[in-house]
Image: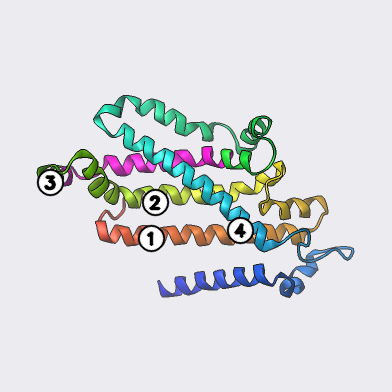
Amino acid sequence: MKRGLVIRLGVLALLVAFLLTPESFAGLFAPLTRFGAPAIYNQGSLLALTANHLLITFAATLAATLVAVGLAILVTRPFGTEFLSLSRSLANVGQTFPPVAVLALAVPVLGFGTEPTLFALFLYGLLPIFENALTGLSTVPSAVSEAARGMGLTPLQRLVQVELPLALPVILSGIRVAAVISLSTATIGSTVAAHTLGEIIIAGLTTNNTAFVLQGGLIVGMLAVLIHDGIAGIEKLLLQRTGRVGRTA
């Protein structure tokens, strides 16, 4: 446990150091360049691109979480069960089309830039969050629900004070999956002029500079690992509190 934490902190420190002082790592990437090409991406700030990439990922995941959890709450209420099939179909929309296709369809309506990327990531994140929220809310022990009802709690109070806290570890599992998918997929947003880490990879591919491609890939990969492990750590803490071990995906 402690060893894993030390490794993650080391990865985080290495990533921060690279983003703040990328030129100090030029010697590591120089062997991957040819014909005197720059070893470090020099067409923009790595730190600014990373921050914008994370912001887009966070915004898309937050929007998907609000909509997906809202739908899950709706279909687990007595008055909303008939909307289960419709809600599941809506959540599946993002998985039906590849992100590139969604971007191509969104650009004529939303234009180039961040907006179509956010839309594509939002759609792509709905399904894992919805399914996990549905599972979490549907598997709240009936004895707990009955005890809450016996205490005189209203349906809203039971939802907020009992059901959502118990379902939160499972919901977080879906958010973790959606966040990692969005973080990785956001790189293609640069094809429609969104300022993401995809710019570094595209620049490397167009100039045949492997160093650029590796830098973009490494930053995205390290962020994905850190976000995945960070959310997973929160899940474990919540599972210890709720006792619902083994329920997350």
Mark 4 or 3: in front is 4
Mark 4 belongs to which amino acid?
A: Ala
Q: Which dot marks residue 7? A: none
Q: Earlier in the sequence, mark 4 or mark 3?
A: 4
Q: Is 85 or 110 nearer to us in this picture?
A: 110
Picture disc at residue 51: 4
- Gap between marks 1 and 3, in whole Å? 27 Å
| Disc 2 residue type (three-letter) | Leu
- Residue 3 falls left or right of residue 18: left
Kindly state the secondary structure of the residue where label 2 is placed: helix
* Badge 4 density bin: few <14, some 14–19, many ≥20, Cα 10 Å: some
Label 2 vs 3, first from the N-terminus: 3
Estimate the x, y position of residue 210 in percent, counting from the top left: 77, 59
Residue 69, position in %: x, y?
38, 41
**Nearer the observer, disc 4 or disc 1?**
4
Could you tell me the amino acid type at mark 3? Ala
Question: Which residue position holds label 1?
Answer: 234
Q: Is residue 152 left or right of residue 72?
A: left
Give above or below for 181 relative to 1: above
Q: Secondary structure at mark 3?
A: helix
Within 10 Å of disc 2 (Cα), the crowding (few <14, some 14-19, many 20+) is many
- At horizontal 80% and vertical 58% (from top left) the residue drawn is 209
> Which portion, as a residue range, is magenta?
120-145
Say which residue label 3 marks.
Answer: 147
The image quadrant of residue 36 is: bottom right
Task: Look at the picture and state if 78 lies above or below 237.
Answer: above
Mark closer to the chain start, 1 or 2: 2
Viewer-nearest residue: 194 or 85: 194
Badge 4 or badge 1: first in the primary sequence: 4
Looking at the image, residue 121 sits to the left or right of residue 47; the answer is: left
